[in-house]
């Protein structure tokens, strides 16, 4: 790869080209070619601005802008030849521009530097990912709303410590995830609004003596405004970190739900049947249907959070302004973005296709003394017992049922009265799981009517 000539783009003061190892550690073209479209968009905006401000001629700008489109089609058509000796996407494109249009190509880099160029390209790339992230979240939330609406009144056990706690509704459980992914959605929107300032025109670090118009390039690239400090503009990677941290929290949510789907789809739970489209078989055990997609989603948080940690470590000791360390930002973000989008899409597909097993859910909802709290509440409400005493009486009844090998509603009235003689027939009304969930009408509670109200609220929010 190494030849003896110095670098075409910056080699003026160099007598010899780089060592092969130097080239290998320095080059980013192997990965930053993913920002080709953003690089060309940024350069086209810059060229138009250079002409509008009289820094270069209209003819030169037109040749540059046209030549860049030619290069874009070469890249999209797969005919563009990338060169490692040209280090990165910025110099690969500019060198090719020279071949395509000749002398005017050399005027493109007036009043800018690769430092503001790479910050601009990367921001545009991350911004596209935030938009895709938003779309993926909305699709997933809609899939969850579909499940919640269909099963607003299906009863199932609610757990704490993964021990049966109180009956809840399927819809309520789905809506818990809607809230989580809804917060992710608001984080994505916040991050996008905050990051949308243009670094272009910050030049190497200090701005430029050319009379550039940064508002014009900012507007052309869909930014809200130019970034206000040139040192900060070229050295800021907060936008990438916000993407990664938002992605990490979302991946953590995906992982929690994936974990539940793994448990729920097991033969021991049978709460849910995953579709064939989102399951796999075993090569040795013919009976098996494995929740591989859920397991992989559960694992993705590892690499996404790893990317977040890695970039934090890259950035934490860097003095202002640009340092080459920052070239290590892209692979982390690319990998995290690819895997996040895949995980979101897989989760959306699984949720759309899965079947909640209503019968198994209901059977499990009634077991494990899940209405014990309802019984204690009845003792408070009807007999006027202090809650602590009611808790004690209920505990004795649970112990009795456990001893008899039955559930609370299976105890006779006489057996109950042997623990507390005030208990009357009407206690049996609160021991059914349906009555239990229907009674939890407090705002945000599990009653089907509350669930339906939350589904309607979210449908309106997303409409
Ligand atoms: N490939 C570089 C990167 O990804 C572009 C910026 C290079 N700037 C410089 N001063 N060497 O960060």
Image: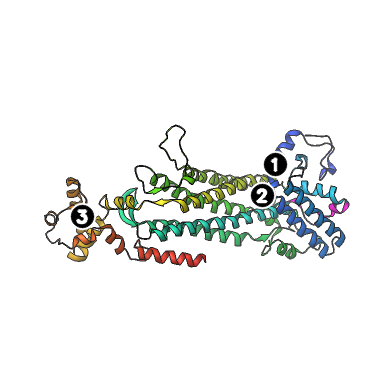
In the image, 31 versus 347, the foreground residue is 347
Q: Which mark is residue 409?
A: 3
Q: Which residue corresponds to mark 2?
A: 319
- Quadrant of the drawing holding the N terminus: top right
Whole-Å distance between the Cαs marked 1 and 3? 67 Å
In the image, 52 versus 113, the foreground residue is 52
408 shown above or below 15: below
Residue 233's spot in the image, x, y percent?
68, 56
Question: Does 111 lie within the magenta span?
Answer: yes
Decide which of tag 2 and tag 1 comes sooner along the chain: 1
Q: Is mark 2 within 8 Å of ligand 1?
A: no
| Numbered disc in front, either 2 or 3 | 3
Residue visible at 74% across and 65% down in the picture: 216
Q: Which residue corresponds to mark 1?
A: 30
- Highlighted magenta segment, given as a residue range: 103-114
Location of residue 49 (image quadrant): bottom right
Q: Is residue 453 left or right of residue 37?
A: left
Q: Count neighbours of disc 2 (C-alpha within 10 A) and say few if under 14, some if 14 to 19, many if 20 or more.
A: few
Q: Is residue 269 left or right of residue 462?
A: left
Q: Is mark 1 within 8 Å of ligand 1?
A: no
């Amino acid at each position: 790869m190494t030849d003896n000539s110095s670098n075409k783009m910056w080699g003026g003061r160099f007598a010899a080209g780089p060592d092969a190892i130097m080239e290998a550690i320095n080059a980013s073209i192997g990965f930053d070619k993913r920002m080709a479209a953003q690089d060309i968009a940024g350069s086209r905006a810059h060229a138009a601005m250079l002409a509008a401000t009289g820094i270069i001629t209209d003819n030169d700008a037109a040749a540059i802008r046209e030549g860049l489109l030619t290069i874009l089609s070469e890249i999209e058509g797969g005919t563009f030849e990338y060169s490692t000796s040209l280090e990165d996407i910025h110099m690969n494109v500019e060198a090719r521009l020279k071949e395509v249009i000749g002398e005017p190509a050399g005027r493109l880099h007036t009043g800018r530097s690769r430092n503001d160029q790479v910050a601009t390209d990367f921001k545009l790339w991350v911004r596209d990912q935030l938009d895709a992230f938003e779309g993926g979240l909305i699709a997933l939330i809609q899939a969850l709303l579909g499940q919640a609406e269909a099963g607003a009144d299906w009863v199932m056990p609610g757990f704490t410590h993964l021990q049966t706690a109180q009956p809840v509704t399927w819809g309520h459980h789905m809506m818990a995830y809607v809230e989580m992914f809804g917060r992710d959605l608001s984080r994505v929107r916040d991050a996008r609004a905050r990051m949308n300032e243009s670094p272009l025109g910050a030049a190497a670090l200090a701005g430029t003596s050319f009379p550039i118009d940064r508002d014009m390039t900012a507007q052309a690239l869909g930014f809200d405004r130019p970034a206000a400090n040139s040192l900060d503009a070229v050295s800021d990677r907060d936008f990438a970190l916000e993407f990664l941290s938002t992605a990490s929290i979302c991946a953590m949510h995906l992982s929690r739900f994936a974990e539940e789907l793994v448990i729920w789809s097991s033969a021991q739970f049978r709460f849910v049947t995953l579709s064939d489209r989102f399951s796999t078989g075993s090569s040795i055990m013919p009976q098996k249907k494995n929740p591989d997609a859920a397991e992989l989603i559960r694992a993705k948080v590892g690499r996404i959070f790893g990317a977040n940690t890695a970039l934090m470590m890259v950035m934490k000791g860097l003095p202002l302004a640009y340092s080459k360390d920052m070239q290590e930002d892209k692979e982390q973000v690319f990998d995290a973005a690819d895997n996040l989008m895949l995980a979101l899409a897989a989760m959306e597909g699984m949720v759309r296709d899965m079947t909640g097993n209503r019968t198994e859910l209901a059977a499990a909802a009634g077991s494990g003394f899940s209405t014990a709290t309802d019984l204690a509440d009845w003792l408070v409400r009807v007999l006027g017992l202090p809650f602590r005493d009611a808790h004690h009486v209920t505990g004795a009844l649970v112990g009795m049922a456990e001893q008899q090998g039955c559930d609370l509603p299976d105890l006779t009235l006489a057996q109950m009265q042997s623990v507390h003689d005030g208990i009357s027939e009407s206690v049996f009304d609160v021991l059914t799981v349906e009555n239990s969930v229907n009674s939890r009408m407090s705002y945000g509670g599990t009653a089907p009517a509350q669930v339906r109200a939350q589904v309607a609220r979210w449908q309106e929010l997303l409409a």
